[in-house]
Image: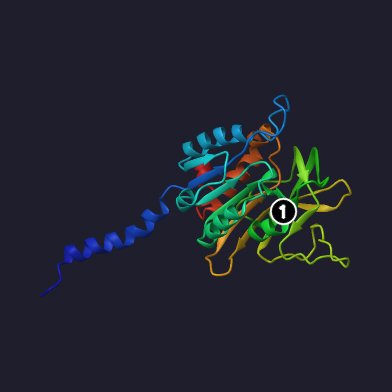
Amino acid sequence: MRPNRYLLLALSVVACAGPLLAQQQPLRVFIRSSEKTHGAADNGSHDYPAFLESWTKLLTERGAVVNGGKRFPSADELAKTDVLINYSSDGANHTPEERSLLERYVKGGGGVVVIHDGMCGADPLWYASIVGGAKQHGERNSRHAVMKFHIEDPSNPIVKGISDFDFDDELFFLLRAEGLAPGPDGKPTMWTKGLKVSPDIHVLATTPDPQDNIVPQLWTYEHTLAGGKPYRAFVTLEGHSAPSFDFPQYRTILLRGIAWAGKHPVDELLTK
């Protein structure tokens, strides 16, 4: 029996359309928020609920499917998430159950975006093993000032076309990093530019700290936990005040970082 050429043609079209349809699926985002931690008159500083509201609207308008709340997502919610955005007070703190859920999520290939205080917690070495770097809660390791935001890798698609700029926000320093050996005294070494860290970390931007040490402020982390799939994390230490999210260069970087972490085209959220 001769094969039906129309049937073969139809099957060929379906086979070719499958990958295309998969690429066209909307980016699924969960925003982990928390209560605001600064006073109401403090220029929108650490206004996590306002970010949850405004960026749910923004990302939805750009074609993403967005969920979120002032809490850690459930297992069912994570199963429907491509990118977990962590913008919350001391967001590196997780209960044992939340740690298990997060590790299971990234083992499945889920992406993570960490903004500002989302990378601060009581166990920075654990969180650094998930997102590349983190900050110890309780240390004097931040300063609000107009910083020189230096792009370290202008060819990277997340920051491509963006030149160095002055940025009025809060910089973080005294960072722990994945793969960074402790000092001679056995205590954690603080992460500054040039120190040998995990090769999975790629620094995109830096700025000087109060002692003029050059400290990473923006990086990607492409990693695989034992027994899991490769996943992506994008970390930005800025985002202290609400006006920062309207700053054109920073908004572009953040939108690209979210798409990149979800393994979508980096400019997808800029063009929809």
Q: Identify the residue at image location x=67%, y=49%.
A: 93
- Please indicate whether residue 213 sits to the left or right of residue 24 in the image: right
243 up-or-down from 95: above or below: above
32 up-or-down from 214: above or below: above
Can you tell which quarter of the image residue 22 is in? bottom left
Q: Nearer the viewer, residue 94 or 231?
A: 94
Can you tell which quarter of the image residue 14 is in? bottom left
Image location (x, y in percent) of residue 77: 47, 48
Q: Nearer the viewer, residue 68 or 261?
A: 68
87 up-or-down from 153: above or below: above
- Marks counted in the figure total 1
Secondary structure beneath label 1: strand
Image location (x, y in percent) of residue 226: 58, 69
Give the quarter of the figure containing the N terminus: bottom left
Q: Which residue, given by chain and number where applicable, does mark 1 sit on?
A: 134
Q: What colour scheme does the image use?
A: rainbow
Outermost residue toward the top?
41
- Please indicate whether residue 16 sits to the left or right of residue 123 in the image: left
Badge 1 local density, few (<14 within 10 Å), some, or many (20+)? many
Can you tell which quarter of the image residue 187 is in? bottom right
Outermost residue toward the front?
96
Q: Identify the residue at image location x=52%, y=60%.
A: 109
Question: Label 1 amino acid?
Answer: Ala
Image location (x, y in percent) of residue 81: 48, 50
Q: Identify the residue at image location x=56%, y=46%.
A: 72
Image location (x, y in percent) of residue 31: 55, 43
Q: Nearer the viewer, residue 130 or 122?
A: 122
